[in-house]
Image (tube, rainbow, N blue to C red):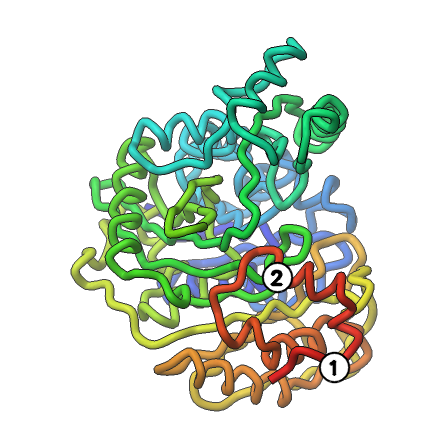
Amino acid sequence: MFDTVLIANRGEIALRILRACRDLGLRTVAVHSDVDANLRHVQLADQALCIGPGPAADSYLDPARLLRAARLTGAQAIHPGYGFLSENADFAAAVEAAGLTFIGPPSQAIRVMGDKVAAKATMRAAGVPCVPGSDGALGHDRAEVHEQARRVGYPVIVKAAGGGGGRGMRVVRDAAELDDAVAVTRAEAARAFHNAEVYLERFLEHPRHIEMQVMADRHGHVVWLGERDCSMQRRHQKMIEEAPAPGLDRDDVARLGALCAAACRVIGYVGAGTFEFLYENGSFYFIEMNTRVQVEHPVTELVTGIDILREQIRVAQGHPLSFAQSDVTLNGHAIECRINAEDPTSFLPTPGDVAAWVSPGGPGIRVESHLYPGYAVPPHYDSLVAKILAHAPTRDLAIRRMQGALAETTLAGLTTTLPLQQRLMREVGFRAGGFDIHHLERLIQDGWHQGAQDEA
């Protein structure tokens, strides 16, 4: 048990964690870089401590600084949020070794599922369907690599074993491209993830991105909370998420959820987690597991009525889950739009000052943001500045509510993706549902985001 939580993150997720801790009567410690001293969660926390300069490598990504901050403030638990060190097995192990509670899964579970090769092997053993691919990491025998690609079947995708966030992957459509793709991906993986291992998967041409939310406690209970559709992406970065996924057979979803719960028991998983799948031609294929809370967790909270952050913290305290699988029901439909500080046509980051910020309201609207007038969005971190959510009894009404919410939103002084999100709510393919992960990329290639076609 613990009564003080150090929030090892920033922005909207740090504020979300603080609110969950407050609901549970827990004391909070906000650590921050020197450019984040005026963030809302820093001002609201019971105690705040500067841990370094703006660059994340010298603050939020420095395990020693975070552990020292915990010792100095008397925090007994660390919540990593998402990003930064949230899926770093070495950091989780260091927290455990220091006698503190890591609010997340055991370090060994993070380690297994963080290595994509080991994760796929584990999932196959647990009966979870995987994308056809190479037998483990690729060796350096060129002939063997080509034989594995031939066996998997072109087109293939070369992926970094330690990759994530859309980095460390190359699509290969024929054998002539394979050698260069493997070499380039290995070099990128070594630089970005300090792990040069790569593997092959069959490249699915028109898949959807479907993910399954799970929760597990230390008493052997595992529950799945339904699926999300995260197919609206650009360069593997999600822009819109919704729950439930339009058009899926509910019996198929239930079978997948049961498989994910069984897999959690195999790996000894504890806390909140997400299994990610590609879905094509009626089949699901496991691609990776996110061993943390997701950016898009609120859409699941809206349709289930379950506070995932609160439950995650309770589980870390040693409590059993406060609900069983039979208690989980889906109520209506929820959509989330990520608002990023990026140019909506070039997608280049646009740090700057917020001149005005008026968030929307109304039935079924939820906003997660750390913005306030006068806030300066720094150039050092992820560009996400707000998440706007709409919940309604039906998907059509959720879309209409989202259209109203985006129209109500005022965010002046900063260039964001808000205009793009407004257009996507009117786009024919989005409104129909069931689009694949390449849908937005095709629209952008056709100049849709600069024109007026294909809108309903």
Along the viewing direction, whichever of 375 and 68 lies nearer the viewer: 375
Report the disc number at residue 314: none
Q: Position of residue 410 (x, y in %)?
A: 70, 85
At 75% from the left edge and 72% from the top edge, which residue is drawn? 449
Disc 1: which residue: 452
At 38% from the left edge and 47% from the top edge, which residue is drawn? 283
The image shows a total of numbered marks equal to 2
- Left or right: 232 as drawn, with respect to 79: right
| Circle 2 crowding by C-alpha within 10 Å: few under 14, some 14–19, many from 20 | some
- Please tell me whether residue 346 is drawn above or below residue 189 in the rendered image: below
**Which quadrant is the C terminus positioned in?**
bottom right
Determine the image quadrant of residue 69: top right
Q: Position of residue 93 (x, y in %)?
A: 48, 29
Mark 2: amino acid = His
Q: Can the viewer see residue 116 in this picture?
A: yes
At 31% from the left edge and 43% from the top edge, which residue is drawn? 260
Q: Residue furthest left?
A: 326
Q: Position of residue 184 (x, y in %)?
A: 76, 28
**SS of the residue at dot 2?**
helix
**SS of the residue at dot 1?**
loop
Disc 2: which residue: 439
At 32% from the left edge and 53% from the top edge, which residue is drawn? 314
